[in-house]
Amino acid sequence: MLFKTGKMKLITYMSTGLFMLLSAFIMKKDNWQHQSLYENKWSLKKIYTKRGTEEVNTKAFIKFNQQRQSAGGNGSCNTFGSSLIVNGDKISFKDIFSTKMYCEGLQQTEDKFFQQLNKINRFEIKDQTLLLLRDDEVLLEFQSE
């Protein structure tokens, strides 16, 4: 009977240790993803719409500020900003604002960028790529600088 009790304690301790190790790994992975979101300048590379994919070769970018819970950058011509809510892989941009210059040849790209940004509700980071999605549909693709 003593042997069985000792064996049960050992199994319990090992199970608890394994659970704690896995929990720490999952939490670290989640924090790394969010850490990467905030530590990078993300250059806009592609805009996905129902009409197709548009390659972007402008100075459009976005940066995220965890402390201020905000995002901002350049839409191709104008600077922009917004408040930001991030919870796990969920993300939303609120009260997006921008300067109002008109830039010939860039305005359509910027307009699409801001339209898609308003629809975003989720994000994924894969290597150096940030995907902003609406549910499972990729709307914007960025590369880390």
Image (cartoon, rainbow, N blue to C red):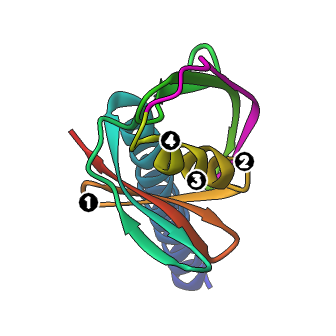
Question: Label 3 belongs to which residue?
Answer: 112
Q: Residues within 10 Å of mark 4 (few under 14, many from 20)?
A: some
Q: Residue at x 62, y 14 (%)?
A: 68
Quarter that holds the C terminus: top left
Q: Give the percent coordinates (x, y) of residue 64.
A: 49, 29
Amino acid type, label 4: Gln
Q: Earlier in the sequence, mark 2 or mark 3?
A: 3
Residue 112 falls within the magenta-colored stretch: no
Q: Which residues are magenta?
A: 90-103
Distance between mark 2 and mark 3 Cα atoms: 10 Å
Q: Earlier in the sequence, mark 1 or mark 4?
A: 4
Kindly report the secondary structure that dominates the magenta region of the rendered protein.
Answer: strand
Tags 2 and 3 in contact by the CB under 8 Å rule? Answer: no
Question: Label 2 belongs to which residue?
Answer: 118
Amino acid type, label 2: Asn
Q: Residue at x 73, y 56 (%)?
A: 119
Residue 125 to residue 38: above or below: below
Element on which disc 1 rests: loop
Distance between mark 1 and mark 2 Cα atoms: 25 Å
Q: Earlier in the sequence, mark 3 or mark 1?
A: 3
Question: Label 1 belongs to which residue?
Answer: 127
Asked whether 7 or 79 is in front, the reply is 79
Tags 2 and 4 in contact by the CB under 8 Å rule? Answer: no
